[in-house]
Amino acid sequence: MATPSGIVVCAVYAALLVLPVPAARATDVVKPLKAEEFAVRYAYHFELLDAVLETTVAEFGPYREEAFTAPMSVRREHEEALLGNLINLMISDAGHKELDEGMIPVPFPIDKGLLGYRVSLISRDNQAKIAGVVDIAGLRSLVIGQGANWGDVAIYEFNRIAVETAMDYNSLFPMLLHGRFDLFPRGVTEAPQELAAYGAQYPGLAIDEHLLIKYRYAQFFYVSKSAPRLAERLLAGLERMAGDGSFDALFARHFAESLSGLDLGRRVVIELENPFLPAWVPFDREELWFGPQRF
């Protein structure tokens, strides 16, 4: 004969059996493009991505990264990102119509807009020629080198500056040193990293000490429309990191020293117009942008 306590235990156990089991939270699958050439260019961005995903685990649950590491052209990169199969996350500057319309842009400038502040990689022997440029008319006497399909190309062309392009990023360095163009403008967060990475291979490579080219520009995370939850997660994580100071700390750790070494405040500034930015770029949030006064 069952004791009263035994009856209670059995009743509780039976009740538990019929309670609904909480559904396991879905694992977000993150598919960035991590080809070899991005190891230098996007080291900060990938570290930021990892930090954003980690800081949102409590709210959004686990995640898994399935990086695609084979090289591909910019055109194919865009095509694959729109499909969302091999790649469902892109790091890109704003203003590419196919990405702005075909993907979900995360409206947070992950580079603080520093992509729009440009110093140039040059051939060391060309410094004296570049030092004579004092305005946009002088800049128009030079030729700019850029990757084909880069958003900057349209900006330079809109401002009537000659541009030489290449499909392959790595071919831009020998083209520069062989005189195919005069300036290879890079974001102020990119140039020091690239000189450190490629300087030994190209001893004639240097950073121009004279010009600072400036236009409204920034980098963002873009997410495939097949992964809207991932876009929501990235924005939530970026906002959280901005609020607790960890975003600024990560940014400073990567770039503060190199920015101070570029002596930006003493350069000749040439401002260009950029009419190609979409309306969702959050220029009204001043706290997200790097202020020129910090130069």
Image (cartoon, rainbow, N blue to C red):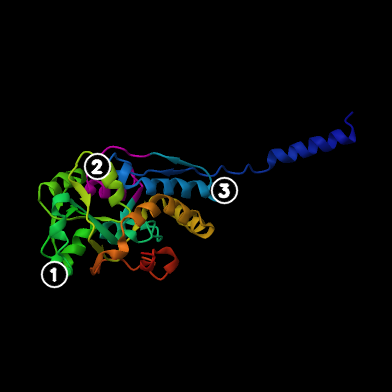
**Which is nearer the N-term, disc 1 or disc 3?**
3
Residue annotated with mark 1: 137
- Is residue 255 inside the magenta stretch? no
Is residue 289 something one can see in this rendering?
Answer: yes
The magenta span reads 67-90
Horizontal and vertical percent position of residue 51: 47, 47
SS for tag 2? helix
> Is residue 277 positioned above or below 48 on the image?
below
Q: Are marks 3 and 2 in contact (CB under 8 Å)?
A: no
Residue annotated with mark 2: 198
> Is residue 134 positioned above or below 189 on the image?
below
Q: The disc labelled 2 sits on which kind of residue?
A: Tyr
**Circle 1 crowding by C-alpha within 10 Å: few under 14, some 14–19, many from 20:** few
Is residue 94 something one can see in this rendering?
Answer: no
Q: Residue at x 15, y 44 (%)?
A: 174
Q: CA distance from mark 3 to mark 2?
A: 40 Å
Asked whether, in this view, residue 229 is left or right of residue 36, the answer is: right
SS for tag 1? helix
The quadrant of the picture occupied by the N terminus is top right
Specify the quadrant of the image occupied by residue 13: top right
Residue annotated with mark 3: 58
Q: The disc labelled 1 sits on which kind of residue?
A: Ala
Q: The disc labelled 3 sits on which kind of residue?
A: Ala
Asked whether, in this view, residue 26 is left or right of residue 81, the answer is: right
SS for tag 3? helix
- Is residue 68 inside the magenta stretch? yes
The quadrant of the picture occupied by the C terminus is bottom left
Q: Are marks 1 and 3 in contact (CB under 8 Å)?
A: no
> 253 or 48: which is nearer to us?
253
